[in-house]
Amino acid sequence: MISVSIDSKSIGDTKVLGRVSFEISEGETLAVVGPSGVGKTTLLRVLAGLDTEFEGQVQVPEHCAMVFQEPALLPWRSALQNLTLVNGVSDAAARAALGEVGLRDLANRFPGQLSLGQRRRLSLARAFSAAPDMLLMDEPFVSLDAPLVEEMLELTESLLASRSIATVFVSHAMEEAQRLATRIVRLTGSPAVFEDPAP
Ligand SMILES: Nc1ncnc2c1ncn2[C@@H]1O[C@H](COP(=O)(O)OP(=O)(O)OP(=O)(O)O)[C@@H](O)[C@H]1O
């Protein structure tokens, strides 16, 4: 369960977030949409515990995984090691996770030897193999072409459907939000607040 009650969040002299509060249960996916620069990544950073300088209270599970706009892989480690070293999972668990995203046969490749789509899938496998209670996704499909977005959406849908994770999915794209989310909220204004009544 995620319970968020932010009163305000400033960066420097600028108040980026106003009052933002919501709860997410296990198995729910909250999509946060809104224009560029409104504060979506700022909200995710607070949830992830990467930014603790805000007014309010945030209660999140201990085990969190993030999927970023860029895959953010260890370039000098194999696909398998990107899972075993980062998450501390066994070789067998890592191979099973690679299998789930269709990379079973590419376990020994370095990220630089994978296509963009394969790197994105590796990034998903890394997040899900960590067995998180909370998953934070920050525009994970940005700058991909339409077929690859579709492939990633299908993959993410199936990975989420087989687990009970509380997920926050940030996106510009309403179609992506509608595919993945159980609830959609829009951040708007400056300082940013949810446009509709808090869910
Ligand atoms: N380190 C920083 N220093 C100063 N201002 C910042 C910093 N990080 C973010 N901001 C500002 O805070 C606001 C919110 O940024 P944020 O990255 O959260 O927006 P976003 O909604 O995620 O945007 P995008 O969709 O373009 O990624 C922006 O106006 C941005 O310029």
Image (cartoon, grey):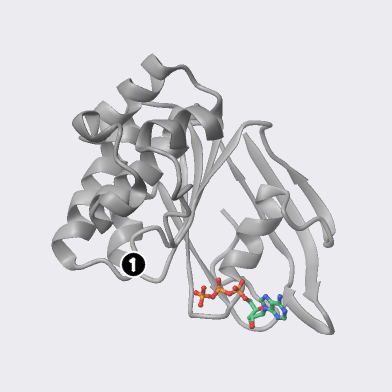
Q: Give the residue number, with chain letter if any, for mark 1.
A: 174
The image position of residue 163, as x and y in percent, is 40, 26
The image position of residue 198, as x and y in percent, is 60, 58
Residue lying furthest left in this view? 147
Which residue is at the front of the view, 186 or 122?
122
Residue 143 shows up from this direction: yes
Residue lying furthest front in this view? 76
Horizontal arrangement in the rendering, residue 121 relative to residue 186 (left or right)? left
Whereabouts is ligand 1, in terms of quadrant? Answer: bottom right
Quarter of the rendering containing residue 156: top left
The image position of residue 130, as x and y in percent, is 51, 29
Tell me which residue sits at (49%, 43%) in the image.
Answer: 167
Horizontal arrangement in the rendering, residue 160 relative to residue 101 (left or right)? right
Horizontal arrangement in the rendering, residue 174 relative to residue 117 (left or right)? right
* Rendered view: 165 above or below 190: above
The image position of residue 183, as x and y in percent, is 44, 51
Tell me which residue sits at (43%, 62%) in the image.
Answer: 139
Which residue is at the front of the view, 70 or 169?
70
Query: Regarding mark 1 in the picture, which secondary structure is present there?
Result: helix
Q: Residues within 10 Å of mark 1 (few under 14, many from 20)?
A: some
